[in-house]
Image: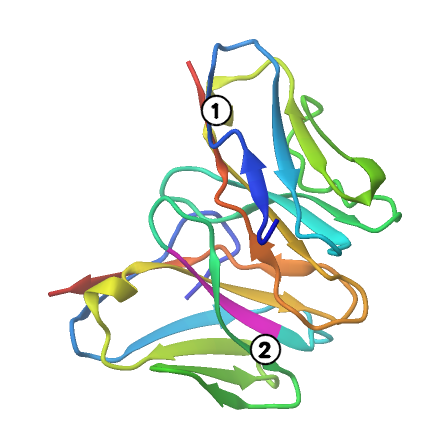
Amino acid sequence: GAGVSQSPSNKVTEKGKDVELRCDPISGHTALYWYRQSLGQGLEFLIYFQGNSAPDKSGLPSDRFSAERTGGSVSTLTIQRTQQEDSAVYLCASSFGRGLDTEAFFGQGTRLTVV
Amino acid sequence: GESVGLHLPTLSVQEGDNSIINCAYSNSASDYFIWYKQESGKGPQFIIDIRSNMDKRQGQRVTVLLNKTVKHLSLQIAATQPGDSAVYFCAENKTGNQFYFGTGTSLTVIP
């Protein structure tokens, strides 16, 4: 597609359920980021993928959070046993990564509400 | 200016005035910088970028200034309009490595 695509755009889930959020990066982009943004707050880094390198998971807030990137393209962020404090907008971004100075492009985000 | 924590600094300006949003970046080796604008309900969008071999770059109504000595980046918006109300993020990058985004600054334009 022309841009970074995230699905679903909105997700309401019950506390304790698992959720999966999907990100389709721009074709050819080797770098992929996940960020979390709570209402009225700034961007909170979660995880960074670059090609086949080991991901930088330093931003994941707990072991309930995990992410995969299959085939160097699509990424899935999984939150297990969701809690109300997980409610936020989850943003994905992608960029060309190594060797090129170009911007990171963001998707529109997935708004997660845990009730 | 932007801070390490997630609390959003705020800036209010009168319509027609100039706005200055500041950002302190952390890595002296960073060589590429971007400003993003995030409107309500949308993802951040690119505004302007600058490379470390430059001190200043101008776009349409926006200017980015880079001071590598003190690791400071600023975004100047001329003749601020209501449509400029948004959250503004800076991002730093060392070529080939990951981007690091600032927390953001919320700009409110008062009509």
Assess disc 2: are there few (<14), some (14-19) or many (≥20) residues with their C-alpha within 10 Å of its C-alpha.
some
For residue A85, the mark is 1
Q: Residue at x 63, y 38 (%)?
A: A23
- In the visual, does B53 lie left or right of B83? right
- In the visual, does A52 lie left or right of B12? right
Q: For the magenta stretch, what is the residue range?
A: B33-38
Q: Which one is nearer the viewer's eye here, B74 or B36? A: B36
What SS does tag 2 mark?
A: loop
Q: Residue at x 41, y 45 (%)?
A: A41
Which subunit holds the residue at mark 2? B
Query: Mark 1 is on which residue type?
Result: Glu
Asked where in the image residue B28 lies, by quadrant, the reply is bottom right
What SS does tag 1 mark?
A: helix
**Residue designated by label 2:** B71
> Image height check: is B31 above or below A111?
below
- In the visual, does B56 lie left or right of A77? left
Q: Is residue B20 magenta?
A: no
User: Is residue B26 visible in the rendered structure shown here?
Assistant: no
Quarter occupied by the N terminus of chain B: bottom left
How are the colours assigned in the image? rainbow
- Assign the magenta stretch its main secondary structure: strand
Counting from the top left corner in percent of width and height, residue A48 is at: 72, 47
Counting from the top left corner in percent of width and height, residue B48 is at: 49, 75
Q: Residue furthest left?
A: B111
Q: Residue at x 61, y 84 (%)?
A: B68
Assess disc 1: are there few (<14), some (14-19) or many (≥20) residues with their C-alpha within 10 Å of its C-alpha.
few
Quarter occupied by the C terminus of chain B: bottom left
Which subunit holds the residue at mark 1? A
Question: Which of pointers 1 and 2 indicates the residue nearer the eye?
Answer: 1
Q: Residue at x 65, y 84 (%)?
A: B52
Residues at marks 1 and 2 touching, judged by CB atoms closer than 8 Å: no
Counting from the top left corner in percent of width and height, residue B80 is at: 24, 74
